[in-house]
Amino acid sequence: MKNEPFVIERTYNAPVEKVWRAITDRDQMALWYFQLKEFKPEVGFVFEFEGGPPEKTYLHRCEITEVIPNKKLTHSWAYVGYAGRSFVSWELFDEGGKTRVKLTHTGLETFPADNADFARKNFEMGWTEITGKMLKEFVEKA
């Protein structure tokens, strides 16, 4: 289990194109996800954002590694100044007007085990909130 990727799937009452825009358009991402200075769904594009618990935030540095429009977006996920590099994949599946999203986060075990902020349970809670509430509410609103 320790080296297993974290995988979560959710189905939204929204078309694939709408979900794709929500996860790849910087202005839309700002409304439900992270505030990014810049974002382009292009392989090699590097983006950064601040995040973490209220008492300590971390600078995240990510690089887009795979883009298949309306189907898959993969990027690295690392913390500036800390060991470890992981990867997040968003896969979208058209379910007849609805969209099934499969989010996979691999490499969590590469982060420092002695830092409780990098514990697997925090990623599980975060991605559950992000996919189960934040993204769902954003793409399903009229």
Image (cartoon, helix red, strand yellow):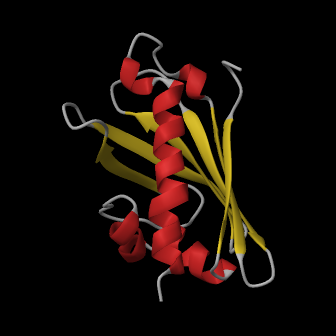
- The N terminus lies in quadrant: top right
The percent position of residue 32, horizontal first and vertical second, equals 39, 66
Q: Which residue is at the front of the view, 37 or 9?
A: 9
The percent position of residue 21, horizontal first and vertical second, equals 54, 77
What residue sits 41% from the left and 54% below the top? Answer: 47
Q: Is residue 95 above or below residue 111?
A: below
What residue sits 46% from the left and 74% below the top? Answer: 138
What residue sits 47% from the left and 82% below the top? Answer: 141
Name the outermost residue toward the left: 55
Q: Is residue 102 above or below residue 142?
A: above
What residue sits 38% from the left and 16% below the top? Answer: 115
Q: Total number of numbered labels?
A: 0
* Left or right: 71 as drawn, with respect to 113: right
* Left or right: 70 as drawn, with respect to 22: right
Q: Is residue 91 above or below residue 142?
A: above
Q: Which residue is at the front of the view, 102 or 27?
A: 102
Res 118 → quadrant: top left
Q: Is residue 72 above or below residue 112?
A: below
The percent position of residue 16, horizontal first and vertical second, equals 68, 78
Name the outermost residue toward the top: 114
